[in-house]
Structure formats: structure tokens, C-alpha cells
């Protein structure tokens, strides 16, 4: 198993087009151009699991702070559209969830690769958050984050 890439501030954020919970295609470049906002891309392993639910609900509960500070939040996982709909509806999530079942975007962002799970090395989603500036470059990159308390850490790092 090989080490995943890691994006650094100043790197060009890989563009992508993924499907949201409603079956619509969402393109990063278009989101940046249409909203004029920075984008918080957070990568999580699986909808409907305890840690991912905690993290998603934290983003939901803090969405107003991100929005008023000029950020759009997008959650990305390898889940199917059906699973994203179930997750969104069950937890009342009010930001866009995107599915990457092929894991191409996850890999491009360094959010899929070798990680430790209960002391064993496995291939999987590396819980990560990438802040993309309006010019399409990486502003901040957080890898191997914990679900609990992560949203507060991101807010502190962004001065929110």
C-alpha cells in the first residue's frame, strides 16, 4: 500500500464533477464561479455512521457561520445517491452532499489511501477537510482529522 498524496496551501485544487443527493451534477469550478465564495470540502468515510453523523451535524449546526463568512460547505463520501438522500433527510442536513463511488476525487485530494484502523493498515477514506480559495487554489488542508471537535478547529483556523 502506498502513501496518499497531500495537498498543500497554494496547490491547485483538483476540479471535479460529482453527483449530489438529488442526482444533480456539481462542478467545483462552477460552484466557485457562481457563488464567489470559498469552499469547505470535507471528506468522510460513510454516511449513517456515528463519527460521520457527528461531523455532518456539526457542519449543519455551524452552517450559518460558514455562510456568513463567505464559505460554501460540500461533503464528499464514496456513498451512493440513495444513501446520501437517506443521510441528508434523517439528519436534516442543509448543505450539499456529493457521492464519489469511484473514489477518483477522494484520491485526487489525498483523502483515500493507506490509514490505520484499529491498529491495522487498510485502504480507506482518510477523514480530511480542504479549504479551496475563490481562485481555485488550496487555502488550508487538514488530514487525518477526528470527527468530534473538527468543525470548531476549522472555524478557529479560518477566524470564524
Image (cartoon, rainbow, N blue to C red):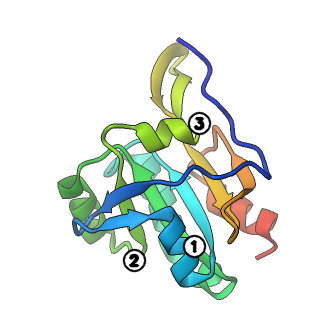
Label 1, secondary structure: give it: helix
Q: Earlier in the sequence, mark 1 or mark 3?
A: 1
Q: Earlier in the sequence, mark 1 or mark 2?
A: 1
Label 3, secondary structure: give it: loop
138 relative to 107 in the view: left or right: right
Label 2, secondary structure: give it: loop
Q: Position of residue 152 (x, y in %)?
A: 69, 64
Q: Position of residue 47 (x, y in %)?
A: 33, 51
Q: Which mark is residue 95?
A: none
Q: Position of residue 97 (x, y in %)?
A: 38, 63
Q: Which residue is mark 2?
A: 94
Residue at (80% x, 63% y) in the render? 157
Pick out the residue farthest to the left.
Answer: 82
- Of residues 40 and 88, the one nearer the viewer is 40
The reply to whether residue 62 is visible in this rendering is no
Q: Which residue is mark 3?
A: 110
Residue 102 found in image quarter: top left
Give the total of numbered labels: 3
Residue at (59% x, 45% y) in the render? 128
Pick out the residue farthest to the bottom.
Answer: 68
Q: Which residue is mark 1?
A: 32
Amino acid at each position: 500500500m502506498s502513501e496518499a498524496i497531500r495537498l498543500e496551501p497554494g496547490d491547485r485544487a483538483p476540479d471535479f464533477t460529482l453527483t449530489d443527493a438529488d442526482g444533480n451534477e456539481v462542478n467545483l469550478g462552477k460552484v466557485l464561479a457562481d457563488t464567489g465564495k470559498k469552499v469547505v470540502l470535507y471528506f468522510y468515510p460513510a454516511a449513517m455512521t456515528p463519527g460521520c453523523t457527528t461531523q455532518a451535524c456539526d457542519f449543519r449546526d455551524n452552517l450559518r457561520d460558514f455562510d456568513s463568512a463567505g464559505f460554501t460547505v460540500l461533503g464528499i463520501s464514496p456513498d451512493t445517491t440513495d444513501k446520501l438522500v437517506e443521510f441528508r433527510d434523517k439528519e436534516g442536513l442543509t448543505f450539499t452532499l456529493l457521492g464519489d463511488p469511484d473514489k477518483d476525487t477522494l484520491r485526487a485530494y489525498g483523502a483515500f489511501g493507506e490509514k490505520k484502523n484499529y491498529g491495522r493498515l487498510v485502504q480507506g477514506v482518510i477523514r480530511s477537510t480542504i479549504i479551496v480559495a475563490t481562485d481555485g487554489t488550496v487555502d488550508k488542508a487538514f488530514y487525518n482529522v477526528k470527527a468530534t471537535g473538527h468543525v470548531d478547529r476549522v472555524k478557529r483556523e479560518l477566524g470564524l
